[in-house]
Amino acid sequence: MNWPTRIPSWNSALAVVALPVLLFAGCSGGKIKLPTDFTPPPASYSLGAADAGPLAVVTERVRPRLGPGESAFLLIDNNTEALRWRLMLIDSARESLDVQYYFWFLDDGGALLMDRVLAAADRGVRVRILLDDFNIEGAVDDELGKIFEQHPNIRIKIFNPVKARSSILGSAGEFLTSMRRLNQRMHNKMIVADGHLALVGGRNQADQYWGLGEVFNNVDLDLLAAGPVLEQCEEAFDLYWNHELSFPISVLEYPVTPAQLEKVREEIALDVKQNQDVLAAFTGELGNWSERLDRLPDRLIPGKAKMMYDLPATDRRSRPTQLYEALDRGVGQTIQEELVIVSAFFVPQQEFVDETLTAVDRGVKVKILTNSLASNRGTVSHAGYQRYRRALLLAGAELYELRPDAADKPDYETPPRQGASVAVHSKAFVVDRRHAFVGSLNLDPRAVMMNTESGILVDSEELAAKVLEAIERNMTLDNSWQVRLNDRKKVEWVSEGEVLHKEPVRDGTQRFLVWMTGALANENWL
């Protein structure tokens, strides 16, 4: 089944360009710049699988349960557990930590993670952190990143950075003149610890992914992986780490003294201490994960798998489409009975609608979960989805949109925090109840054709059942609206105890923004 394939036009309307320009300009520093003459540092590579340590013990214990070429997986669909497993990987590493994310906010959970990363580096673990430049400020920002570079065991790189960082206008101007390069962002998400365990999926590093968000929390999925697929994860990380678009954050030109590292450490430690009540669900096991690690081998599900990722390219001749194309060849064209999709941002385009109609006509059941306008945190993308919603229903797809007040909302919160709403952030699909993909790839033109993405495709009926259960639990009528056509072929939203004839929305401003974007936007940018 073919997914969105249309090549984005670079002649988009100025009104559509203005929004990403302003967003990008707002993320750019005002006092620093990249040097004009820069000699890249020597390449560095994965250290491979550590010979000893608690993570090595896990892989030794799980290896006898694996068939030829099989890896092993644990699906993580609980936000509280998602942060616990990350802390476990960091605390248990003995030789190496490789971390790649679209963003890492130093909020409550982010500060706790960074505190543990510093502790790992102190005990001799080599830490490599690669972050996309788009969200670098407000997360591990430029100054903080360079301070971390004072630690002998920590290196941080930023991917595809804006060069004109001396002013907002300069950054915005560069975005307009270098749009082909800067409009591509690194959306990959992965942690590899000691070459033995990896976390790959849809979560970035921020409170809304751990159930600590006060405005909203995300429904999301990760895979904890062990086995041969780890070599592929390491190859993917090394490719990006050593690419010419990955700049050491230390090249940013402004003075930082080694003494400032201690100040930053103290501030992070103080933040963690002051937030003990909020972080109580995570701090009890810090430094002692033996019970969790002891149970892990028996929880891991075997399956043949492939780590899939785009190449870090930025030109028209080599767009980052490898992940999409591999998925389409591997399972998209072989669907026989059922395709179940969850995609936070979903802009299907006409090709997907046509393929859905063809699939349904030959007996394939197609079910899709995405955000409602009321739960959607990416209002702009919703305009592209709206254009094809009715056509998808006419083609025979079952369509569900998450309610912001879903009955299961408390399941995605970590007490004592309670978010005001919940939103879908998962990117996963299940084919014929056998093949499951979990990763960072939304089904929209930006994800397919512009950003780089990654994920793991697993051939395992047992794991596919777990992923399917995680998706379908949010398709129930107390968690989502089922979108359907009534007798007059008009779209309506059906949930437990109600039928809506007008699209549910948070407020009138959101409805206006979607209307304006829909009127002006080239959908290939959404």
Image (tube, grey):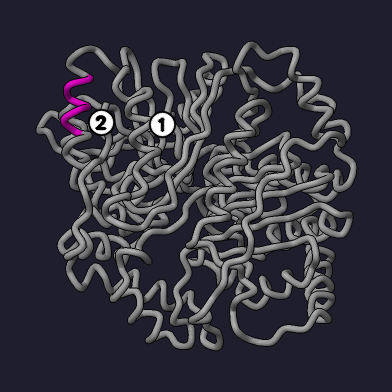
SS at circle 1: loop
Residue plotted at (39% across, 44% down): 442
> Residue at label 1?
477
Q: Nearer the viewer, residue 183 or 201?
A: 183
For disc 1, the neighbor class at 10 Å (few under 14, some 14 to 19, many from 20) is: many
Residue 381: which quarter of the image?
Answer: bottom left
Q: CA distance from mark 2 to mark 1?
A: 29 Å
> Residue at label 2?
2
- Which is the main secondary structure of the residues drawn in magenta? helix
Q: Does residue 163 show up magenta in the picture?
A: no
Q: Is residue 421 above or below residue 146?
A: above
Image location of residue 304, percent across then percent down: 55, 19
Query: For this view, does 263 lie left or right of residue 520?
Result: right
Residue 193: which quarter of the image?
Answer: top right
Q: Which mark is residue 469?
A: none
Image location of residue 94, percent across then percent down: 84, 45
Mark toward the viewer: 2 or 1: 2
Whether residues under marks 2 and 1 lie with C-beta atoms below 8 angstroms apart, the answer is: no
Q: Which residues are magenta?
A: 353-359
Residue plotted at (66% across, 38% down): 198
Residue plotted at (48% across, 25% down): 436
Q: Earlier in the sequence, mark 2 or mark 1?
A: 2
SS at circle 2: loop
Residue type of the residue flagged with mark 1: Leu
